[in-house]
Image (spheres, rainbow, N blue to C red):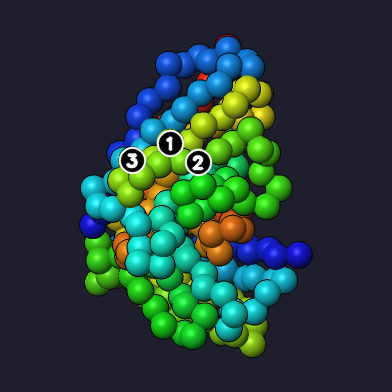
């Protein structure tokens, strides 16, 4: 199985600051179609996960442009430009290249 | 609009079988795949399996011997059955179309 490893944030983060969440996969997620099968989700407290980014850098419909995804085949970053109160929660990366789909352990964002 | 909603028993006894239903609306199960994902309390997400739009299934090998996913397209429902439940199967169970998620249903395994 592909192992997904996420980094931590220096919580709590001051409102308005920009933060980057890292994720690493044990295998390249770049497929032969040119797409990188890496998703980012936000799970707010008490809620279901919400898709933020798919194909490593494509924002899902309705997601603020403060969120951006980037990376290579195995190293990925989710950047939040100007953290707001509604961004609080746990962020997960997930690989969709092959089954079983696997998630990172999650990165918690707390606001100061 | 697209919606998914899980339903099932909140409490299951150890060694018994869990049966969950995911009822979808706003799309056809013959056009989109539906996945099951679970989350133990306070822990991370685990992908369990997928019902593909063509009826094909794929399971997490860690659960494969205990897990079965099926569907009734006429009722827009996807079913999850998992046997030999243990306390570590206590979790919120979600059905998802990736871009859309159900609210989840908490299943507690306890005598």
Q: Secondary structure at mark 3?
A: strand
Q: Mark 1: few, some, or many residues within 10 Å (few <14, many ≥20)?
A: many
How many numbered marks appear?
3
Q: Secondary structure at mark 1?
A: strand
Residue A105 percent location from the top left of the image? 35, 39
Tell me the distance, in whole angstroms, between the alpha carbons under discs 1 and 3: 7 Å
Residue at the image position 46 percent from the left and 63 percent from the top: B36
Residue at the image position 64 percent from the left and 17 percent from the top: A16
Residue found at the very far right of the displayed protein: B1
Question: Image height check: is A32 above or below A28?
Answer: below
- Callouts 1 and 3 close, C-beta under 8 Å: yes
Q: Quadrant of residue A42?
A: top right
Question: Image height check: is A18 above or below B88?
Answer: above
Q: Mark 3: few, some, or many residues within 10 Å (few <14, many ≥20)?
A: some
Who comes first in sequence, dot 2 or dot 3?
2
Task: Kindly identify which residue carries mark 2.
Answer: A69
Task: Kindly identify which residue carries mark 3.
Answer: A75
Q: Is residue B47 left or right of residue A88?
A: left
Residue B69 percent location from the top left of the image? 42, 75
Residue at the image position 61 percent from the left and 30 percent from the top: A87
Residue B54 percent location from the top left of the image? 49, 85
Q: Which mark is residue B6?
A: none
Q: Which mark is residue A77?
A: 1
């Amino acid at each position: 199985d592909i192992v997904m490893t996420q980094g931590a944030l220096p919580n709590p983060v001051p409102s308005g600051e920009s933060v980057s969440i890292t994720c690493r996969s044990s295998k390249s997620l770049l497929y032969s179609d040119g797409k990188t099968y890496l998703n980012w989700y936000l799970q707010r407290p008490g809620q279901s996960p919400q898709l933020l980014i798919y194909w490593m850098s494509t924002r899902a419909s309705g997601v603020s442009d403060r969120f951006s995804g980037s990376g290579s085949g195995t190293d990925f970053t989710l950047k939040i430009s100007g953290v707001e109160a509604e961004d609080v929660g746990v962020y997960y990366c997930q690989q969709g290249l092959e089954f079983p789909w696997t998630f990172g352990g999650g990165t918690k964002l707390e606001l100061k | 609009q697209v919606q998914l909603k899980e339903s099932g028993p909140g409490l299951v006894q150890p060694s018994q079988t869990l049966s969950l239903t995911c009822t979808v609306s706003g799309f056809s199960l013959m056009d989109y795949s539906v996945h099951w994902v679970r989350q133990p309390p306070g822990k991370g997400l685990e992908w369990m399996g997928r019902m593909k739009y063509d009826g094909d299934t794929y399971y997490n090998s860690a659960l494969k011997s205990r897990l079965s996913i099926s569907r009734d397209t006429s009722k827009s429902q996807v079913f999850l059955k998992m046997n030999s439940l243990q306390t570590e199967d206590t979790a919120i169970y979600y059905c998802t179309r990736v871009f859309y998620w159900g609210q989840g249903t908490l299943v507690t395994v306890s005598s």
